[in-house]
Amino acid sequence: MNSTFWTNTIWYILLGILTLIQLVFVMVKAKRRRLTLALYLTTVGITLYFETIILIFFRAYAYYPMIIEKHSDPFNDVLAGNLFSQFSVSTTALLVSILDLKYYWYFIFGCIYGIIEELFIALGIYSHNWYQTWMTVLGFPILIWVVKRCTQRFCKV
């Protein structure tokens, strides 16, 4: 095990475990699991598309999960960190949508992700270039709203 496992990698693994727990819970609660899975994959695609643009083209931030130990391009590790983040965000948006939670939960989860982001910054496993945490806090409710509209309109899950 490398020296960065307990300082960097473990936090991304814990985020991944939380994501899996949420996804299992969502699938258990969903009435139409196939459509829910399709909506989840669509949501992941939407978030990855958006986040990849601001990560790669606009260099908004960087992840340091140190998952890929020996690699020729350090950006591969940044992309791995981005995947953990976007799968987590997508799962939580789907969870809020499937449970049909009230609007104030959109902002509560936005604040939770803002706290996680600030924790990752404090731990030195994520950094901002020009991006700021308030953008996550305000952007997350928008993502939930979009996912909820898709759920209501297309899936009726």
Image (spheres, rainbow, N blue to C red):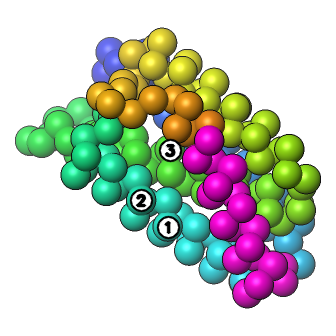
80 magenta-colored: no
| Residue for badge 3 | 85
Residue at image point 25% right, 41% down: 59
Mark 1–mark 2 contact, CB under 8 Å? yes
Query: In what quadrant of the picture does the C terminus appear?
Result: bottom right
Which SS type dominates the magenta stretch? helix
| Residue for badge 1 | 46
From the viewer's perspective, tell me whether residue 73 is left or right of residue 129: left
Question: Is disc 1 surrounded by few (<14), some (14 to 19) or many (20+) residues within 10 Å?
Answer: some
- Disc 2 element: helix
- Closer to the camera in the image, 4 or 109: 109
Q: Position of residue 16 (x, y in %)?
A: 57, 43
- Closer to the camera in the image, 143 or 96: 143
Tell me the CA gap for discs 1 and 3: 13 Å
| Residue for badge 2 | 50
Tell me the CA gap for discs 1 and 2: 6 Å
Residue at image point 63% right, 80% down: 38
147 magenta-colored: yes
